Image (tube, rainbow, N blue to C red):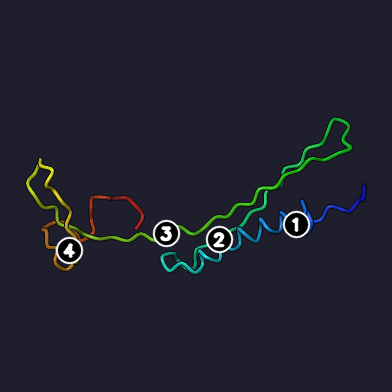
C-alpha cells in the first residue's frame, strides 16, 4: 500500500475538487441571474465528517458539498377578478398596474401586511 499524506486537492481521487467545482458553478450561475440581488451573499461549504475505528488506527471520512444562493427578488402584479361569484367562470385577468383603480387598495397590495417587500 502506497502512503500519501491526505490533501484537499487529491482527496477521494479528486472527487472533492470536482464536488467543489460543481457547487461554485451553481454560485456563478446565481451571480449572473438578473432576478437576484447582486449584492446578496452566496456561499459554498465543504463539510467533512471523520470517525476512527476502535483501535484509532484508521480514519473513515466523507465529504458533502453544499451551496447557498441568493433568494429570488419578489415581483408584484395586480389582476382583475372577473366572472360571477360562486361559479367556475371566475378568472384572474392580468392588467397593467396603472389601469387598476380600486378605492382604498394600493396597487400590488393583496393584504400581505408584514411580509418583506
Assign a secondary structure to mark 2. Answer: helix
Disc nearer the start of the sequence (2/3): 2
Crowd class of label 3 (few under 14; some 14 to 19; many from 20; radius 10 Å): few
Q: Earlier in the sequence, mark 2 or mark 1?
A: 1
Label 4 crowd bin: few (<14), some (14–19), many (20+), radius 10 Å: few
State the CA–CA distance, disc 2 to disc 3: 14 Å
Q: Which mark is residue 95?
A: 4
Residue shown at 77% from the left, 51% from the top:
12
Residue 95 placement (x, y as % from top left): 17, 63
Measured Cα–Cα span from mark 2 to mark 1: 19 Å
- Pair 3/1: label in front: 1
Discs 1, 4 touching: Cβ within 8 Å: no
Q: Which mark is residue 72?
A: 3
Of callouts 3 and 1, the N-terminal one: 1
As measured in the structure, the alpha-carbon distance from the residue carrying label 4 to the one carrying label 2 is 35 Å
Residue at image mark 1: 14
Circles 4, 2 touching at the beta carbon (< 8 Å):
no
The quarter holding residue 51 reads top right
The mark closer to the camera, 2 or 1, is: 1
- With 75 as the anchor, is 71 left or right in this view? right
Residue at 32% across, 50% down: 114
Amino acid at each position: 500500500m502506497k502512503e500519501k499524506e491526505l490533501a484537499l486537492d487529491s482527496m477521494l481521487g479528486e472527487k472533492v475538487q470536482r464536488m467543489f467545482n460543481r457547487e461554485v458553478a451553481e454560485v456563478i450561475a446565481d451571480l449572473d441571474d438578473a432576478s437576484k440581488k447582486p449584492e446578496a451573499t452566496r456561499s459554498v461549504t465543504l463539510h467533512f465528517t471523520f470517525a476512527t475505528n476502535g483501535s484509532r488506527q484508521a480514519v473513515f471520512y466523507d465529504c458533502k458539498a453544499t451551496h447557498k444562493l441568493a433568494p429570488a427578488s419578489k415581483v408584484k402584479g395586480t389582476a382583475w377578478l372577473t366572472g360571477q361569484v360562486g361559479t367556475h367562470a371566475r378568472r384572474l385577468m392580468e392588467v397593467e398596474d396603472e389601469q387598476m383603480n380600486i378605492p382604498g387598495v394600493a396597487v400590488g397590495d393583496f393584504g400581505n401586511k408584514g411580509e418583506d417587500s
